[in-house]
Amino acid sequence: MRIATGATTDLSPEAVLALYETLLEDLQQDPDFIVLFCSEDYEIKPIITALQHRTPNVALHGGTSCKGVMTQMGVAAGENGGLAMLAISDPDGSYGVGVVPCAPDAKEAAQQAINQALINADCPGEVPSMVWLSAVPGHEEAILDGIAEVLGPDVPVAGGSSADNELDGSWKQFTIEEVYNDAVVVTALFPSTDVMFAFHSGYEPTDAKGLITKAGGYEATVNKGVATATSQRTLIEINGRPAAEVYNQWTDGLISDMLGSGGHILGLTTLRPLGRVAGYIGEVPYFQLSHPDSVTADNALTLFSDMAAGDEIVLMRGTVDSLITRAGRVATSAMETHVADPEDVAGALIVYCAGCMLTVENRLGEVVDSIREALPGIPFLGTFTYGEQGCFLNGGNKHGNLMISVLLFTKE
Amino acid sequence: MVIQSEQLLETVLDLERSRQRERDIRLEAEALLEGLRGMSGAQDKEELFSALVQALRSVIDFDQAFILQAKNATAMTVLATTCASIQDSHWKIGPVFSKALSGKPVASFDITQIPEWKQLPAATVSTVRSALHIGLSGSSKKTLLVVTHQDLKHFGPRHVKKARRFSPLASQALLTLELRRALIERDRFYQLSLDAMAIFSLDGALVQQNQSWSTTFDDEQVQAPTIFALVHPEDRAPFQDVIDQLHQSEESQVIKTRLRKNSGDYHWFSCSIAVYPDQMMYYIVARNIHDSVLFEQKLAYQAGHDSLTGLKNRAEFMEYLKSSFSLYRKGRGEPCFALLFLDLNKFKQINDTLGHDIGDELLKAFAATLQDVVRSNDVVSRLGGDEFTIILPKVNSIEDAKAVGNRIRTRCQTPYELKGHSIQVSTSIGIAMSTPDFTHAEEIIHAADLAMYNAKQDKSLPFSIHQGPLHCNLVSNS
C-alpha cells in the first residue's frame, strides 16, 4: 500500500486537479481510494466533476472541514480555507463508498449507505476491516446504530461530522458523483494491510459530577433544515436542577452571562466539557465527551451529542496545551495497538475536533508538529469536525465531542 | 517539564491499554500453543480436524466447522466437517474463497450475500447465518477452514485478526500431517528397496537401516558395527577421504568399495553417500555390484592377457613397456631395465607335423617355463605366435639379463613331454638394455627384435644383445 497526501488553498478545480497529479506522481500508480476534505469555501461539484473525468473509477469519500485542513506539510487554512487530499494505492485491497441523505431516517440511511459501500467495494456480505464515516451533524448516534445493525457492533467506525466555518449549516458530504449537505457518507475499507486506530479525549475528570434527571430533543438552531426530532441533545436537568445552572456552578460562573437569556457558549466550554464514562481499561475509566454549545431560555444546555436521563455526567477539564499535544499522543497510541514502528505506517487519517481547533487556532501549527513528531515522515490528512466518531479499545463505536480519532494504514 | 494531570491520566490509560493488550495476546498465544500441541500430534485428517476445531474454539466462538479441499481449479469438496448437512456439499471457488485462499481470512456477517454460499441448497445451510473463511497453506491442495454461526453479524474484524494468527499454526499442523504421511510412504519404499540403506552418525555408528541392510550386513557376532568396520581394510582410506570431502558440501558422491557381508565375505558395493553435518549424520545407499565388478575385472584381464598362455598380451606389454620407459626417462637412467625378445625356433615345423593342439600345448609349457625362471616382478608377455618378451625391471647390468637368458636356455635343454610326444625346443633371444640413446619405447622393442633376429641367423650365438639404436654387438656364449 502506498499513500500520498497534499493540500492547496487555491479554490479552483484546476488547482485540485494539479494536486491530484502531484499525488499520482508520489504514488506512481492510480489510486484506489481518495479521501478529500475542504473548507466550505470550495465549490465541490466542479471539483468532483473534474476528478471524475480524470479518474472515473476511483472511490472518493469527501466532506467539509471547519475553516481548513491539515497535512504533514502544515495547516492549509488560508483566507479561503483549504483543501487536502489523501490518495491510497492498494490494488490488493477493496474500497467502496456509499452515500444516502439522512432524512427522513438517519439510521435507515446509514444502513443503506453501508450496504451500498459494500456493493461498491465488490464485497457484499463481507465484514470490512473498518468503516470511515462522514455525516451531517445531528444524527451520529443513529448513524452508528444503523451501521451496527448491518455489520454488527464489532466493526470499528471512525470519522467525524461535517463542519463549516460559522456553524450555519454550510457543511457538505460528497462522493465522486454527488454532493449533499444532509447525508451520511461511508467507506467500507478492505485494505490489503492492517489498519490501526485510536479514539481519545485527553481531558481529565473533575470532582463535579451529577445525574441527568431530564433530557430531551430539540430543534437545533444551527442545523438548518435538518430534522432532529429523534436527537436527545438537550440536557434539561442535572440532579433535579436546571442543567445550565448546575454547569455554571461547577465552572465557577463560566456561563453566568447566558443564564436566563440563553445564547451560544461553544467557545467558552471547550475546556470544560461534560463527560460520561464510556468504559474502563483495567480500573481506569475513560470518557466520552459532550460539548455544551448553547444555553436555552429555560436554562437547559444543548450539546453536540445525545444524553439520556439516568446517565451520570462528570465535568471534565482540559488545557490548551493538552489540546495541542494530544493529537500526537493519540497517533502514538494508535500505533501501539499493533506495536508498529512509524516506518511501518503508510499514512494516516486524523479527525480533530473543530471546537478544539478553534480554541488552539493560533497554535494549530504546534498540533501539526505533535502529529509529525509521532508520525515522522508519514503522510496524513487531518480534518476539523463537529463531532467525532471512533471505537474505544474495549469495543463499541461512540460519537463524542472534543475527541480525536486517528486511523493508520500499515504499508505491509 | 511539568506533566499536566490530563496527560498523567492519558499515560495511565495508555499503560492500562498496553497491559490489557499484553494480557489478551498472552492468553491467546497460550490457547493457540496448546491447540498447536494437539494439532501437531494428529495422525490422520480426522484427528487433525478435531484438533483444529478444538484449538480454534479456544480463541473464537463458533457453532460448526468444516474443511474444504480443492477438487480442481474451480471446485472444492468437504474433507471433514462437524455438520452432517455439509458433508456431501460441493462448492465453487468464488471471490470470497479466492481471497481467503490467498491468505486473507474473510468474515461474512450474512452468508446469503456471499456468492459461494448462494449456490448451496437452503436446507444444507439452514442453521448458518454468518461465517469465517480461513485459508490453510500447509497442503499441496488448496485448503479452506470454514467456521459458522447461527447468528447474523457474529464474526467481526477481531475474529479475522485471530484467524490470521491461527492460520499459520493450522497450516503448519496440516503440513506436518502431510509430511508425516509422506514419510510413511517414503518409509515403505525405503523398506521395499533392494538396495541396502542406512543412516550413520558422524562417528560411523548405525542409526537406522532398512530391511535390505539388515539382511545383508547384520551380523549376530558383531553388535552394531560401524560403517568403517564393514569397509575392506584396503578401501578404508579412500572411503574416509570421500566422507571428509562430503563434510564440505551437501552433495552426494558415489564410491565403489568392498563391504563385509554378514557371511564374512567382502563384496563390491556401489555406495551413494551424502553427509549432513547439521544433522550430525550421513546417509548411505549400498547396491551390491559384486558380480558386475568381477565380470568387469575378468573382461579387463582378458583384454590384457593372452587367452592361451595366461601371459600379458601385446597391448598390456606395450603399456608396461611404455610405463617402464617413462619411469626410466624420468629417473634419468635409473633404474635400468632390460627387454628380452624370444622366439621358439622351428615352432612352425612342430605345429605342422604334430598339430596345432601340440603346438598350443608347447606354447603354454614354454610360457610356464618363462614364468618359472623370472622374478615375480619381471613381466613375461606373449606378443603373438611363438614370440615372447620379458621385461626385467631394475637390473644392474647386462649380466642380469644374460643370466635370465641362460636360465631359459638351460631349461630348454629338457624336452617337454606333451601328450605322448617328447619335444626338445630351442629359442632365439635378443636382449636390449634401456639406454639414454632410446627416445621411444618402440625403439627398444625394435632393438630387441633385431637382436633376436641376429641370434636366429647365427645359431652359434645363445642370444644377441643390442646395446643401442645405432649399433649391434653379437655376444658369444663364453
Image (spheres, rainbow, N blue to C red):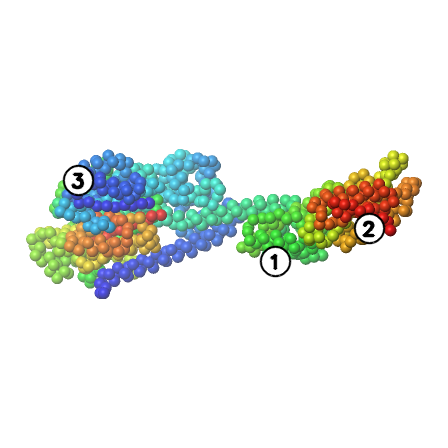
Q: In which quadrant is the N terminus of chain B drawn?
A: bottom left
Identified at 62% across, 47% down, the residue is B254
Q: Nearer the viewer, residue A412 or B85?
A: A412
Mark 2 vs mark 3: give the one in front: 2
Q: Which residue is mark 1?
A: B203
Residue lying at the far bottom of the rendered structure: B1
Closer to the eye: label 1 or 2: 2
Most foreground residue, A110 or B477? B477
> Where residue A102 appears, x then y in whole percent?
20, 40
Spatial CA span between label 2 and label 3: 122 Å
Residue type pointed to by label 2: Lys
Q: Which residue is mark 3?
A: A12
Residue type at mark 3?
Ser
Measure the alpha-carbon separation of dots 1 and 2.
57 Å
> Can you identify the residue that label 2 sits on?
B402
Left-right relation of B101 to A352? right
Looking at the picture, do discs 2 and 3 lie on one chain?
A: no
Distance from label 1 to label 3 (Cα)? 82 Å
**Which of these two is toward me, A94 or A103?**
A94
**Which chain's residue wears label 1?**
B
Q: Earlier in the sequence, mark 1 or mark 2?
A: 1
The residue tagged with tag 3: helix, strand or loop?
loop
